[in-house]
């Protein structure tokens, strides 16, 4: 279906003027890996994508795909082959009457949320500004209100995909269902180029806000024990999280912020949801208490951004766990003792998934999510901070059930990211759609 002409988008070969800028543009993390594709193609539309994939196939080039570039590890940037940048495919169409939308992989989730809000609609977009929906949806999609709506990939009704053969196909429960199954959870190991997502939309919660409390690190054990105990009781409309940092508002020295984003249909419901937290046993230990504040997503995005600033270098690792608090505490204390300067931090999230999900590649989650983010500015500090997340996660690896692809570090520390049966099925579907291995698999795996 390639249009007439030979253009495949803006193209940069290694050594060309503009190549290094295009390579740097492919990753939001300023810690750009020493990996160099032979060719970078910045596609402008689906025709460019088809042409680029067919060219790669004809020339025997392996491919990586970039939508927003927020992969911490830069899984899409490899040595040799072709890097296909689809960030410019950001079209968006909203059909309010059908509660549907179509969106290109380069559309930022926060932009999607803003445009939907004007129609009083909602989609569980990512927590950070700038994250494009392409990689976010493929890896699962842990976003706002996901404890009720599920990972955002559950709201993907279909996808338009350019296969390794250079064919544009539609994947849904009715068409190419195995490709649709794989796309919902394969993440950076997906073996195709998504050019459009077909999304289920929802009514926007009438009230969106948060409550928060801050604590000195001296109360780590009290806070962690309470979070662990309360996990199964946290209402679905609350995303209960704890961030540990050396800079915590209202605290001298290292501390913790426990924050509860709340999604409700009325102010009364929001206050009821928040009551278990604002009236809980930790209240007397808190250095600062913020009762429920209706804020909208704008203020919450601004709060998140303070922990994930632009123009910084990042090293990240994570784990899912269902371990007991007594098993977890030694590792948590070790994290606190070695925590790098802010904005580096640890995230604890009470997740508590339901016993069953729809049948899709996404299949790895547990009661608690722990993630470590080393964040620094100067490349001269790389040696000091780059290994902190993976070292701490290795020390706790015996307590992990797996990892989340959003914060993967599989190149340094391979870990289970889907169940074994689902990984075997992914390999079977890959063999059918990409028999020559044209698309890169996950790092740490051939």
Image (cartoon, rainbow, N blue to C red):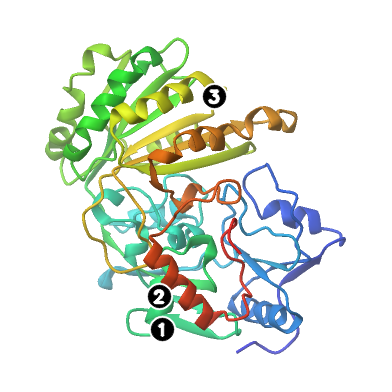
The N terminus lies in quadrant: bottom right
- Taking the image as drawn, is residue 107 in sight? no
- Is any part of residue 220 visible from this angle? yes
Picture quadrant where residue 67 is located: bottom right
Residue 342: which numbered mark, if any? 3
Name the one closer to the observer, 184 or 18: 184
Q: For the residue labelled by badge 3, is the local secondary structure a helix, a strand or a loop? A: loop
| Residue 180, label in figure | 2
Q: Who's the residue at 51% across and 51% down the image?
A: 131
Residue drawn at 86 percent across, 59 percent down: 17
Question: Circle 1 — which element?
Answer: loop
Q: Position of residue 193 (x, y in %)?
A: 55, 72
Of circles 3 and 1, which is in front?
A: 1
Quick check: marks 2 and 1 in contact, CB under 8 Å?
Answer: yes
Closer to the chain start, of discs 3 and 1, is 1
When the figure is inspected, residue 262 is found, relative to residue 285, above or below; the finding is below
């Amino acid at each position: 279906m390639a249009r007439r002409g030979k253009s495949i988008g803006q193209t940069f070969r290694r050594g060309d003027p503009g190549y290094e800028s295009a390579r740097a543009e492919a990753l939001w993390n300023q810690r750009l890996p020493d990996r160099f594709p032979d060719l970078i193609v910045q596609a402008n539309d689906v025709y460019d994508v088809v042409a680029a994939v067919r060219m790669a196939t004809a020339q025997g080039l392996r491919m990586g795909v970039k939508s927003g570039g927020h992969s911490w590890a830069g899984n899409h940037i490899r040595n040799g082959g072709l890097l296909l940048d689809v960030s410019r495919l950001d079209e968006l169409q909203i059909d309010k009457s059908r509660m549907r939308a179509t969106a290109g992989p380069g559309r930022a989730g926060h932009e999607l949320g803003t445009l939907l809000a004007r129609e009083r609609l909602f989609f569980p977009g990512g927590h950070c500004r700038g994250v494009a929906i392409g990689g976010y949806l493929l890896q699962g999609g842990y976003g706002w209100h996901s404890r009720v709506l599920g990972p955002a990939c559950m709201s993907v009704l279909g996808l338009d995909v350019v296969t390794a053969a250079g064919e544009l196909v539609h994947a849904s429960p009715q068409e190419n269902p195995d490709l649709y199954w794989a796309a919902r959870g394969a993440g950076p190991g997906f073996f195709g180029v998504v050019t459009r997502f077909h999304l289920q939309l929802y009514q926007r919660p009438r009230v969106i806000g948060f409550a928060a409390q801050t604590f000195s690190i001296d109360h780590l054990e009290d806070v962690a024990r309470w979070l662990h105990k309360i996990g199964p009781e946290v209402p679905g409309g609350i995303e209960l999280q704890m961030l540990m940092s050396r800079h915590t508002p209202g605290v001298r020295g290292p501390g913790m912020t426990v924050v509860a984003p709340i999604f409700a249909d009325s102010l009364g419901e929001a206050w009821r949801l928040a009551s278990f937290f604002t009236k809980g046993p930790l209240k007397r230990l808190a250095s600062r208490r913020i009762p429920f504040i209706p804020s909208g997503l704008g203020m919450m995005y601004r709060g998140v951004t303070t922990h994930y600033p632009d123009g910084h270098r990042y090293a990240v690792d994570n784990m899912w766990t269902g371990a007991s608090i007594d098993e977890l505490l030694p590792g948590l204390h070790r994290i606190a003792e070695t925590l790098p300067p802010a904005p580096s931090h640890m995230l604890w999230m009470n997740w508590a998934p339901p016993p069953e999900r729809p049948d899709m590649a996404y299949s790895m989650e547990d009661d608690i999510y722990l993630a470590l983010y080393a964040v620094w500015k100067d490349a001269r500090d790389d040696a000091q901070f780059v290994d902190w997340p993976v070292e701490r996660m290795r020390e706790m690896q015996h307590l992990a059930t797996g990892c989340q692809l959003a914060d993967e570090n599989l190149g340094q520390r391979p870990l289970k990211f889907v169940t074994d049966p689902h990984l075997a099925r992914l390999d079977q579907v890959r063999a059918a759609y990409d028999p020559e291995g044209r698309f890169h698999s996950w790092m740490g795996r051939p």
